[in-house]
Image (tube, rainbow, N blue to C red):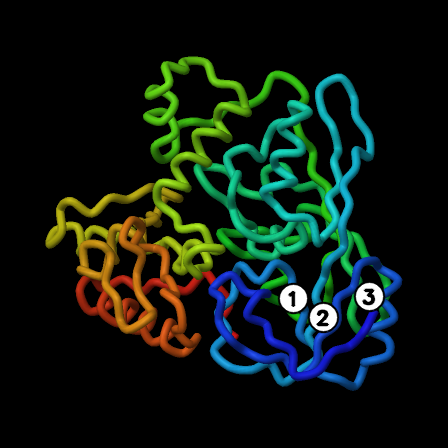
Amino acid sequence: MQIEHHFSLKKYNTFGIEAKAKSFVEVTNTNELAQILKENQNEKLFILGGGSNMLLTKDIDALVVHINLKGKKILKEDDDFVWVQGNAGENWHEFVLWNLEQNFGGIENMSLIPGNVGTTPIQNIGAYGAEIKDTFVSCEAMRIDTQEIEIFTNAECKFGYRESIFKNEAKNQYVITSVVFKLTKKNHKINTSYGAIDMELAKHNIANPTIKEVSNAVIAIRQSKLPDPKELGNSGSFFKNPIVPKEVYEKAHVQFPDMPHYTVGENEVKVPAGWLIEQAGFKGKRFGDAGVHTLQALVLVNYGNATGQEILNVSKDIQKTILEKYGISIEAEVNII
């Protein structure tokens, strides 16, 4: 375990932004993590996972601690369910595939989401009608100031739409080290109603899909819309889908009758941010090396040498335009650093 200085983070963020860390260290187990946290209590710290949900707009004037804790295992099982633990540094998509190989169901709709297992509860990641909170049992997290491991249950995580306790009252206080999921072994709940999953399955004449076939459909859809970060820098969906009061939606809907929506409560609806951005004319637009992806308006991209600030400027232009055109505010889903 070696601390390096003036360290390039270009390979450690999926946007491929060139930014430097004042210092950098990689930890591979909880003992190393505890040691680093204890020895650097007076230092500014920056905890780094898979680097898939952040936009670096400047150098990091701190000790960057890269969480690379590997490992996954079955904790217990009964006839119907299995409790699986994934360590924080495991790649999320590889973790999903590992479970599918054993016919463990419940997270197949979240195939190919970038990032690592440890950051999934922070954001309560989700896709195609599924969210982490649906299968999440608990996570272990090390308290930064005491190095003690604490356990957070599903209820204690206070999950919301792309929200959790780790983004609010517990922000910057913990490092998640492992996560436990309760998955099905049989009688899987197949969810194909969201997005284009049914259409993708129909292409292959699949009427009663397995969880693996649902995963394959999700992967095909995502690959058709979303660029591979290894080929084109991006962070997946840059914006959250806005949840707005019904009256705000109805006012906009009068002027824009084609605006889609999903009911999320008695008085609120969710509007697809991608539709708003595309209709506002941003899809495929390029501003130097920063731009909006040609196939998915939710995705901002780095065509090569864009700075984080340039990508941030594009996002702010989009937010301003959407607010002026529709009267709807959209928030960034990624963390702006």
> Which amino acid does the dot numbered 2 rest on?
Val
**Mark with earlier residue (1, 2):** 1
Residue 65 got which mark? 2
Q: Are marks 1 and 3 in contact (CB under 8 Å)?
A: no
Q: Is residue 189 left or right of residue 326?
A: right
- Residue shown at 24%/67% (left/top)? 323
Q: Where is the N terminus found, in terms of image quarters?
A: bottom right
Occupied quadrant, residue 97: top right
| Residue under the point 32% across and 26% down | 199
Which residue, given by chain and number where applicable, does mark 1 sit on? 48
Viewer can see residue 103? yes
Circles 3, 2 touching at the beta carbon (< 8 Å) = yes
Within 10 Å of disc 1 (Cα), the crowding (few <14, some 14-19, many 20+) is many
| Element at label 3 | helix
The label shown at residue 33 is 3
What label sits on residue 91 in the rendered view?
A: none
Return the x and y of residue 100 as percentages of the image width and height: 62, 28
User: Of residues 283 and 107, which is closer to you in this image?
Assistant: 283
Q: CA distance from mark 1 to mark 3?
A: 12 Å
Q: Position of residue 206 (x, y in %)?
A: 41, 15
Q: Which residue of the protein is positioned furthest toward the left in this rendering?
A: 255
Q: Amino acid at mark 1?
A: Leu
Are there few (<14), some (14-19), or many (20+) residues within 10 Å of tag 2? many
First in residue order: circle 3 vs circle 2: 3
In this image, 336 relative to 259: left or right? Answer: right
Contact, CB < 8 Å: mark 1 with mark 2?
yes
